[in-house]
Image (cartoon, rainbow, N blue to C red):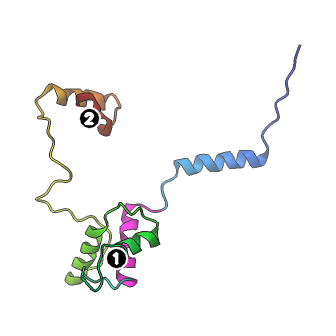
Amino acid sequence: EISRTIDAPSQEEISRTIDELLKEESEPVFNLKDRRVAIGWVFENVHGGLEDSLDKPWRGRDGVMPSIKQALGIQMSVDISKILEDVIDCKRLGQQYTGERRVDPNKTLGRPPIIALETIEAQIIVDYVEDGGSIRNSHALVN
């Protein structure tokens, strides 16, 4: 007979595993609202919080937005112009910028749906989502 011995994990390995599990379950330290505030802060305190102009352009290689993105480690493809506009609006109105998303109540977010609610495609999507599928992946079912 062949017998095997299994080494028990060390205290260090147990602690590391517990730390990894806790890290997976924990909330992120900073959320998107915090990121918007950081962008606004850098815009105001480092770049003067000025409107887009020829003297201090927002876009372009040496612009304000690429500089802020680089300083905060944000991907260059992310558009932060709305945040800068919100900061300027708050300055004009004498309000504090809180990082809250300001959505025009007359506008909807994203494109309007193409599928009418009464169609079989809409029912397929509803059934898929009710069964635990994601809305993001549901479009593959009807396209």
Nearer the viewer's eye, disc 2 or disc 1? 1
- Residue at the location (40% across, 78% down)? 42
> The residue under label 2 is which amino acid type?
His
- Residue at the location (31% across, 82% down)? 49
> The residue under label 1 is which amino acid type?
Gly
Query: Is residue 44 found inside the magenta-colored segment of the image?
Result: yes
Quadrant assignment, res 69: bottom left
As drawn, 84 above or below 134: below
As drawn, 81 above or below 28: below
Give how far across and how far down residue 126 sits, in percent: 23, 30
Whichever of callouts 2 and 1 sits on the residue coming sooner in the sequence is 1
Give the residues drawn in magenta, as a range.
30-46
Q: Is residue 109 left or right of residue 35?
A: left
Query: Is residue 81 found inside the magenta-colored segment of the image?
Result: no
Q: In the image shown, does 7 or 73 lie closer to the viewer?
A: 73
Q: Secondary structure at mark 1?
A: loop
Q: Is residue 12 left or right of residue 94?
A: right
- Residue at the location (35% across, 77% down)? 64
Report which residue position mark 1 lands on. 63
